[in-house]
Image (cartoon, grey):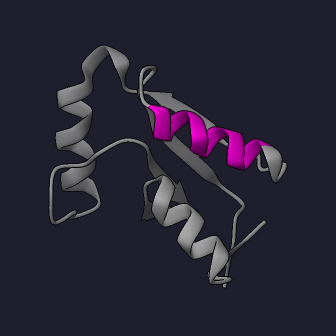
Amino acid sequence: MQEAKNVEIYTLDYCPYCMKAKIFLDEHNVEYKEISCEDDEENFRKKLTEKYNLPNLATFPQIIINGENIGGYSDLIDKFGRGEISF
């Protein structure tokens, strides 16, 4: 089980899943650093894909916990539900 300590979330302003992820983290009193990708979305997609060796082009949000990419909103909810992430 990974305890969330250092949480980063890469977001887009218009992304509903980004908003859901932030609400979920807020409801669980998780401090996080939000990195807006609004100004350079395509460049952020490419950089995140390369940095975390993703099989497909990065989508948003991308949630990083303790330096490990855990994926997007659905991945966050699934991993929390299975007890793989704790807050």
From this view, report whether residue 42 is shown above or below residue 72: above
| Quadrant of the rendered image containing residue 22 | top right
Residue 27 counted in the magenta span: no
From this view, report whether residue 74 is shown above or below residue 48: below
Quarter of the N terminus within the rendering: bottom right
* In the image: residue 58, left or right of residue 18: left
- The span picked out in magenta is 16-26
- Residue 20 versus residue 66: which sits nearer the camera? 20
User: Residue 26, position in %: x, y?
Assistant: 77, 42
Please name the predominant secondary structure of the magenta segment in the image: helix
From this view, report whether residue 83 is shown above or below residue 61: below
* Rendered residue at 43%/43% (across/down): 61
Quarter of the C terminus within the rendering: bottom right
* In the image: residue 53, left or right of residue 83: left
* Rendered residue at 56%/46% (across/down): 8
* Rendered residue at 22%/43% (across/down): 47
- Residue 34 versus residue 22: which sits nearer the camera? 22
- Residue 46 versus residue 15: which sits nearer the camera? 15
User: Residue 59, position in %: x, y?
Assistant: 29, 45
* Rendered residue at 36%/19% (across/down): 38
* In the image: residue 8, left or right of residue 32: left
| Quadrant of the rendered image containing residue 43 | top left
